[in-house]
Amino acid sequence: MSDKSENKEEISKAIIRKAVEVMWEDLPGHFDGALSKMLITPSNAPTKHFDFRLSTYQPKGFVAKHRHEVEEQIYYMLEGEGLMELDGVRKVVRSGATIFIPSGVEHALYNTGTNDLTFLVITSPPLTN
C-alpha cells in the first residue's frame, strides 16, 4: 500500500470505543465530583468538527459559570436531576431533557439532586482544553 493510501485510511478511520476504555477526568472549572470521559476528541479520534463526552456529577458536583465564544453545545440528560443555568436563569433538568447552548451564552450545571447526574455533551467545534 502506498503512503498516501495509508494516510487516507488513518484520517478516515472509523472508531468503536467503549466508555470503560476511557479514564474519568477532572476538567478545568468542574468541582466536587464533576467528572467526564472524553470519548471522541481531536486528540483521540480523527474528528475535526465536534467532541463527544460522557459526564457524571455526584451530588453537589457542578461546572462553574462560563461561556464559549465560538463553540455550541448540546447536553442530553441520561439520569439524575439538577439545575441548568442559562444566562442567569436556572431550570430543573432531568432524564430525557435536551439542552442546546449557543455560543456566547453563560451557563453552569449543578447536581442539586440526591443521585448522580449523568449526561452526554456534544461540542462543535471541539473544545481545546
Image (cartoon, rainbow, N blue to C red):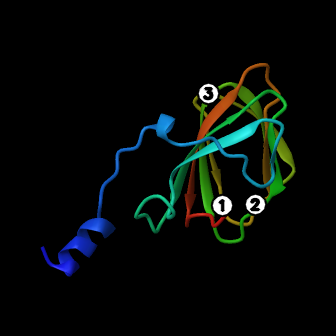
Q: Amino acid at mark 3?
A: Ser
Q: Label 2, on which residue? A: 105
User: Considering depth in this image, is 48 or 19 the residue closer to the camera?
Assistant: 19
The secondary element bearing badge 1 is classed as loop
Cα–Cα gap, marks 2 and 3? 22 Å
Give the percent coordinates (x, y) of residue 118: 64, 32
Residue lying farthest left? 1
| For residue 66, side relative to residue 39 (left or right) | right
Q: Label 3, on which residue? A: 95
Q: Name which residue lies at 29% across and 60% down.
A: 13
| For residue 121, side relative to residue 27 (left or right) | left
Q: Residue 84: which quarter of the image?
A: top right
Give the percent coordinates (x, y) of residue 18: 43, 38
Q: Name which residue lies at 34% across and 51% down.
A: 15
Q: Amino acid at mark 2?
A: Val
Cα–Cα gap, marks 1 and 3? 21 Å
Q: Label 1, on which residue? A: 102
Q: Name which residue lies at 21% across and 79% down.
A: 3
Residue contact between numbered discs 1 and 3, judged by CB atoms under 8 Å: no
Residue contact between numbered discs 1 and 2, judged by CB atoms under 8 Å: yes
- 36 w.r.t. 60: above or below: below
